[in-house]
């Protein structure tokens, strides 16, 4: 029977199979020649001490023990061309994994996506980066694969209670992701590799008889006697079905406005908002690894930091080692930032959202908007940033120490943000209470991470799309909307997920609940 072992080794041993076998032979007191296979189950870095260690969980097969390589394979999905149709609005991770689960249940998904297919999005991303042109339906947030496709592809989630994380990871590997995501403590696909995986998921949905409609924006939800009947698109076309998974993402403001206008119950939800901070990656490496040069055996260092400031959490969000900052506006007249890393994380800079948790009481100046108060608060800051930076996709920016001292930076060095920066005192962008918390918070960060508080770091404002400013309430058991039968609010946009993995899990859960309602049982054990 194979031996499972937890161990902590140097980066040199972890990176060299021969050295690792030598080490293991001593640990379990057998000859190296007796070790047949070593399977790494989990890997993480421990950089808490000056001597950096790699934590490994391994399975050791000795000579004579049966070893069978585990290969992630796609389920044998049925053809659902002639089966009952279910509408899925949104082709992000929640919508795509909901569609796959519906197919497994023997139901036909009709996936409706306002944006373009994954390759078609690239031209619009170039337009916002180079020409400052925002396409409201095709951008970093909208389009096939959702916000995660071109904004990093992080797969780490703390939401273990929400569902089977490994199942989602294994499906992604079966669709072409590297098997390393099953091993790494903080798995990551990379913006350069995720589009092909998303494309393959779409092709599988179509191959099984599902439909995927691009450049098709839902402008109305048909409801009769508090039951879903279908949707209307921007061309006036009606698509009819009595079950609808609404998985439109955290930036689909028109959907929130539609629900509010139709008096379909929604609620204001707290979220977090702040700036995106960019440091030289070498500086973050030196802080995290306590060394002048990290070498080839260690990856670009990430960081995670949180402080309580003025009774609120201020923390790092979506940290991107070896990454860049991207323009993520979804409408003209606003500026929004986000960050991403390619699969190799080989860019010269590291960036992270640094955000402050907001409370419902912060939205009181926008109380007249009711459940949309948080969204209007968010929008007002994005629009103010656009005005202050010159009414283009340039972003207001300030050196970090200058920000803490309320001093306009004389010049902003070139950053990874392609549309460019404008030197602005960021206190003009945010409400006073938020500015005060961030100024104090960065000072506190500098005490915990020596070298973090520096004018080598450039703050870009705002980082405002951390999560949805609206929750679409649903029943805790059936997952149906509390008021509208057949409507299943889903994923980040509905307020029930935060990232690729948790959104995918929520998509599957909503699909399974539809299956229960229709007496359809899954063929795949989840």
Image (tube, grey):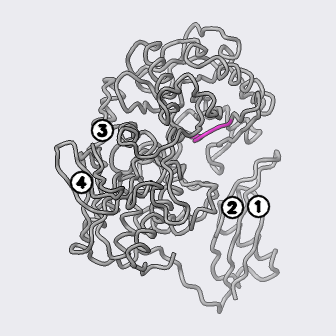
Q: Secondary structure at mark 4?
A: strand
Q: Residue 65 got which mark?
A: none
Q: Residues within 10 Å of mark 2 (few under 14, many from 20)?
A: many
The Cα atoms of the two marked residues, 3 and 2, are separated by 45 Å
- Mark nearer the viewer, 3 or 2: 3
- Mark nearer the viewer, 1 or 4: 4
On the image, numbered disc 4 is attached to which residue? 213
The Cα atoms of the two marked residues, 4 and 3, are separated by 13 Å
Q: Residue 9 got which mark?
A: 1
Q: Earlier in the sequence, mark 3 or mark 1?
A: 1
On the image, numbered disc 3 is attached to which residue? 137
Q: Who's the residue at 49% across and 30% down the image?
A: 337
In magenta, the rendered stretch is: 315-321
| Closest to the observer, 376 or 296 | 376
Q: Who's the residue at 24% across and 54% down the image?
A: 213
Name above or below for residue 342 compared with residue 109: above
Instruction: Confirm whether the magenta stretch covers residue 320.
Output: yes
Q: Residues within 10 Å of mark 1 (few under 14, many from 20)?
A: some
On the image, numbered disc 2 is attached to which residue? 14
Q: Earlier in the sequence, mark 4 or mark 3?
A: 3
Q: Earlier in the sequence, mark 3 or mark 2?
A: 2
Name above or below for residue 40 compared with residue 67: above
Quadrant of residue 184 within the rendered picture: bottom right
Image location (x, y in percent) of residue 221? 30, 49
Circles 2 and 1 in contact, beta carbons < 8 Å: yes
Q: Secondary structure at mark 3?
A: loop
- Mark nearer the viewer, 3 or 1: 3
Image location (x, y in percent) of residue 382? 47, 24
Q: Who's the residue at 42% across and 66% down the image?
A: 511
Q: Secondary structure at mark 2?
A: helix
């Amino acid at each position: 029977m194979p031996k499972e072992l937890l161990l902590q080794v140097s980066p040199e041993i972890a990176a060299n199979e021969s050295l690792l076998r030598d080490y293991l032979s001593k640990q379990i007191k057998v000859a190296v020649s007796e070790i047949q296979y070593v399977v790494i189950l989990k890997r993480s870095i421990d950089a808490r001490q000056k001597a950096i260690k790699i934590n490994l969980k391994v399975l050791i097969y000795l000579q004579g023990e049966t070893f069978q390589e585990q290969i992630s394979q796609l389920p044998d999905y049925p053809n659902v061309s002639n089966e009952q149709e279910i509408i899925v609005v949104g082709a992000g991770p929640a919508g795509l994994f909901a569609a796959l689960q519906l197919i497994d249940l023997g139901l036909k998904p009709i996936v409706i996506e306002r944006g373009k297919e994954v390759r078609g999005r690239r031209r619009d991303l170039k337009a916002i980066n180079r020409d400052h042109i925002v396409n409201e339906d095709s951008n970093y947030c909208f389009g096939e694969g959702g916000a995660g496709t071109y904004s990093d592809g992080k797969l780490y989630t703390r939401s273990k209670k929400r569902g089977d994380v490994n199942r989602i990871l294994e499906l992604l590997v079966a669709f072409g992701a590297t098997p390393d995501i099953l091993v790494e403590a903080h798995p990551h696909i990379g913006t350069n590799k995720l589009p092909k995986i998303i494309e393959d998921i779409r092709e599988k949905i179509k191959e099984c008889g599902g439909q995927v409609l691009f450049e098709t924006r839902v402008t109305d939800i048909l409801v009769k006697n508090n039951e879903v009947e279908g949707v209307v698109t921007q061309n006036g076309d009606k698509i009819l079905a009595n079950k609808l998974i609404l998985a439109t993402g955290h930036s689909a403001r028109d959907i929130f406005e539609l629900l509010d206008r139709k008096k379909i119950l929604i609620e204001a939800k707290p979220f977090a908002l702040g700036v995106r901070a960019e440091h030289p990656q070498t500086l973050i490496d030196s802080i995290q690894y306590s060394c002048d040069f990290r070498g080839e055996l260690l990856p670009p260092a990430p960081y995670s930091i949180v402080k309580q400031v003025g009774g609120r959490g201020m923390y790092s969000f979506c940290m991107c080692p070896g990454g860049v900052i991207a323009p993520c506006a979804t409408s003209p007249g606003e500026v929004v930032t986000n960050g991403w890393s390619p699969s190799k994380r080989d860019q010269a800079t590291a960036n992270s959202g640094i955000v402050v948790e907001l409370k419902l009481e912060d939205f009181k100046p926008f109380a007249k908007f009711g459940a949309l108060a948080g969204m209007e608060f968010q929008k007002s800051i994005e629009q103010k940033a656009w005005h202050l930076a010159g009414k283009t996709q340039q972003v207001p920016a300030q050196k970090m120490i200058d920000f803490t001292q309320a001093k306009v930076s004389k010049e902003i060095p070139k950053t990874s943000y392609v549309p460019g920066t404008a030197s602005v005192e960021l206190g003009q962008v945010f409400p006073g209470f938020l500015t005060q918390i961030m100024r104090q918070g960065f000072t506190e960060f500098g005490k915990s991470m020596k070298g973090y508080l520096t004018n080598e770091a450039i703050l870009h404002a705002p980082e405002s799309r951390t999560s949805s400013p609206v929750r679409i309430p649903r029943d805790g058991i059936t997952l149906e909307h509390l008021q509208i039968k057949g409507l299943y609010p889903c994923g980040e946009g509905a307020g029930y997920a935060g990232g690729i993995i948790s959104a995918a899990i929520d998509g599957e859960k909503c699909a399974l609940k539809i299956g229960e309602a229709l007496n359809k049982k899954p063929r795949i054990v989840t």
